[in-house]
Image: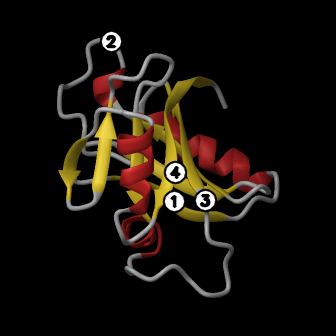
Amino acid sequence: MDIAFIAGFGPIGTVDSASHDFWAGALGIPFHENAPRYFHTEEVDGARAFAIWPLDQAAEATFGTATWPADRPVPQAWIEFDVASPEAVAPAVAELRARGLEILVDAHEEPWGQTTSRLMSPEGLLVGVSYTPWMHDGGSDAGGDAD
């Protein structure tokens, strides 16, 4: 697997406003609400994207249901690593699976154009191996709604 860069990072948010109040209010991070309760910015140096991803939305994107499975640790944060092309995501997933890692969702294209897959790290981070077109040279400008 050839990781091109860290595409994004952020906390898995709470249902109430506590996460937004902390990150935007206390720390002053300028967010855009790209979807209800999904706060995103590309305006923090050092991160291509930083976003508060609500747990119910992370569960929906990973498991197809708004409820995080009770038999799995609840992630506190997410991180995504981008590979060179959409076609490189599936082989990266196969490599991780061959190493004995459990893949939560295989490579697939999201409605906003990002190709992604997900697994959990030993520390409890929700990890994406992705291709985010608008973050690559010559990529489309669809960005901003991705996790």
First in residue order: circle 1 vs circle 2:
1
Dot 3 crowding, Cα within 10 Å, few <14, some 14–19, many 20+: some
Residue 112 in the image: state x and y as whole percent: 22, 47
Residue 84 in the image: state x and y as whole percent: 48, 24
First in residue order: circle 4 vs circle 2:
4
Element type at mark 3: loop
Q: Which residue is mark 2?
A: 137
Q: Does the rendering let one see residue 147?
A: yes
In front of the other: label 3 or label 2? 3
Q: Is residue 60 left or right of residue 5?
A: left
In front of the other: label 4 or label 1? 4
Element type at mark 4: strand
Spatial CA span between label 4 and label 2 = 27 Å
Which kind of residue does numbered mark 2 sit on? Asp
What is the residue that sits farthest to the front in this orientation?
26
Which one is in front, 2 or 8?
Answer: 8
Dot 1 crowding, Cα within 10 Å, few <14, some 14–19, many 20+: some
Spatial CA span between label 1 and label 2 = 25 Å
Picture residue at 39% right of the left edge, 81% below the top: 65
Q: Which residue is mark 4?
A: 11
Q: Which residue is mark 3?
A: 76
Element type at mark 1: strand
Q: Which residue is mark 1?
A: 106
First in residue order: circle 3 vs circle 2:
3
Q: Quadrant of the N terminus?
A: top right
Q: Is residue 102 left or right of residue 69?
A: right
In front of the other: label 1 or label 2? 2
Which kind of residue does numbered mark 1 sit on? Asp
Q: Is residue 13 left or right of residue 74?
A: left
